[in-house]
Image (tube, rainbow, N blue to C red):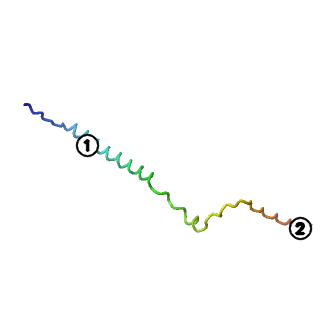
Amino acid sequence: MSQYVFTMSSRMVAITAVCLVLLCVLLFLMGIEIGKLLAPTPAPAAAAVAAPAPMPSSSPLPSPAPAPAAPTQ
């Protein structure tokens, strides 16, 4: 029975290390993108929370009266 001896040259070790680093970077970036998709939407600004928008009504709002004209001489 013959034995197979597997040896890695320094070039193969370097290629393997680079591939592992790239794989880790890609997995990290993919996790960031998935986290952005799954994250809840941010709360509205404090000003919008303090003064909520008026409720829409079925009747239109009356238009403001025109300003009086200045007297001319």
Q: Quadrant of residue 5?
A: top left
Query: Where is residue 72 shown, x and y percent of the image?
Result: 90, 66
Q: Amino acid at mark 2?
A: Pro
Helix, strand, or loop for circle 2?
loop
Residue 72 in the image: above or below residue 15: below
Q: Of the residues tagged 2 and 1, which is closer to the observer?
A: 1
Q: Residue furthest front?
A: 58
Residue that appears at 45% across and 51% down: 37
Residue in front for this viewpoint, 67 or 71 = 67
Q: Is residue 8 left or right of residue 46?
A: left
The residue beneath circle 2 is 71
Q: Kindly indicate whether the residue at mark 1 contacts the one at mark 2 (C-beta within 8 angstroms).
A: no
Q: Amino acid at mark 1?
A: Ala
Q: Quadrant of residue 2?
A: top left
Q: Where's the C terminus, which quadrant?
A: bottom right
Query: Where is residue 30 shown, x and y percent of the image?
Result: 38, 47
Query: Where is residue 29 shown, x and y percent of the image?
Result: 38, 48
The residue beneath circle 1 is 17
